[in-house]
Image (cartoon, coloured by chain):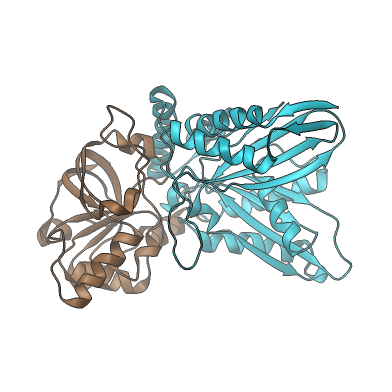
Chain colours: A cyan, B brown
Amino acid sequence: MRELAASTISDHVAEMCEEANIYLGEDVFGLLKEALETEESPTGKEVLKQLIENVEIARDEQIPICQDTGFAVFFVEWGQEVHLTGGSLEEAINAGVKRGYDEGYLRKSIVTDPLYDRKNTGDNTPAVIYTDLVPGDKVKISFAPKGGGSENMSAVKMLKPSDGEAGFIDFVVNHVKAAGPNPCPPIVVGVGIGGTFDKVAVQAKKALFRHVGKSHPDSRFAKLEKTIKDKINDLGVGPQGFGGRTFALAVHIEDYPSHIASMAAAVNINCHACRHLERII
Amino acid sequence: MEPKKIQAPLTDEDVMNLKSGDNVLINGVIYTARDAAHKKLVELMDKGESLPIDLKGQFIFYVGPTPAKPGQAIGSAGPTTSGRMDAYTPQMLEQGMKACIGKGLRSQVVKDALKKHKGIYLAAVGGAGALLSKKIKKCEVVAYPELGAEAIHRLEVEDFPATVVNDAYGNDLYTEGAKEYAR
């Protein structure tokens, strides 16, 4: 049994919170630069130029890419041969978030309860944490600071199996169309299909953690991702919704087996600042 | 097209010279307010009490910045989603506000109020918080410090870039821009 101290988890988490909010991954940055080459709208090009310059300023001056430094969302794959010492996983992650958001001058955006007090917790905790127990003696932590504006433009729908591929495409494209400029396009579209009401939403979230632009391993879903992306870009919404050919940088689908009566679908949108990091400990 | 330089605060004439799709560079003093500050301002208006800032001719920027690092005027400061302010915007315009800066769609009620009161809605590039922070030279809290990032701040801006989305003539860049590039 390998032993791992809770404080080690906290140290990694604190670093990840700062790093993810300041440095945009090469995956998204590369796609923004490609979009600048292909965008047809002059205003759209101007937006993309500002976004690229923004990423460079954030990196050079060590300041957050966006003022919305997000809800701290974690997917943890915990090797079942690892024994955590000195505290619980939840406490360890939250301690890391608290330190990372404080030391990194990141905005604290979490309120205590959603309906009544809405009082800021002051340290951006609690995080949202999903944990899977997996074989092995390693721990993989994936982190994304999830902005509120794009999160608000998300949806779950329990489609009928008879809706088929066309019904699924319509649901995703119409939903993204209605969101329009609100989620800060160019966007990354996380899509879940299959599973239960709750599972499909988590799958859509997980889709946003994928290396942006990487296709689904199943060629049928890879083709569907491209079809949906093209339809979204054909809406003409463009960067920031000012009109143009780059509304979505990527569409990622995560599927899951389905009940015979169901075809659950979910859309979780991310802005162009699709910040995500992973570490294997 | 070269961006137009504009000076805050705005007159009616300034507003009428701006059209949907214009790129502008804003100079002068602007104020921040988002959800919580709007709620407080409108509560005061409803009670007929005086406001902590005079809205006449002013720009309101919907933003909740990150904390400033030592030596910085302000942290990252990009626009937040404007639709959440729709319920308050007509009253803000009645009190003299001339322009608001945010990102995303506005309601028909807001678009009508912009026409009626001669106001404009501009979008700054959402998510360009680091870049926009460089255009803000000075920042001080002028009301509701207890709201933290949501307090009303007075900002001095230089060549702050934004795009006119809804003008005082009823035009909407979000509708017209997408039409031009849809296939």
Query: Which residue ends up furthest to the bottom in the rendered image?
Result: B47
Residue at the location (81% across, 31% down)? A82
**Nearest to the observer: residue B151 or residue A255:** B151
Residue at (54, 59) in percent of width and height: A153
Residue A98: x and y in percent read 51, 39
Can residue A103 be seen from the camera position used here?
yes
On the picture, is A101 further left or further right than B9? right
At horizontal 59% and vertical 63% (from top left) the residue drawn is A175
| Of the pair B93 and A163, the residue shown nearer to us | B93
Q: Quarter holding the N terminus of chain A?
A: top right
Image position of A114 with respect to A72: above or below: below
Vertical arrangement, residue B148 with respect to residue A178, above or below: above
- Regarding residue B164, the answer to whether it shows in the image is no
Picture coordinates of residue A131, whole percent (x, y): 74, 44
Q: Quadrant of the C terminus of chain A?
A: top right
Q: How many marks?
A: 0
Horizontal and vertical percent position of residue A92: 63, 37
Q: Give the residue at x 73% y 61%.
A: A198
Residue A134 in which image quadrant: top right
Above/below status of A278 relative to B175: above
State the residue lying farthest toward the front: A86
Q: Quadrant of residue A197?
A: bottom right
Residue placed furthest toward the top: A60
**Residue A103 left/right relative to B95:** right
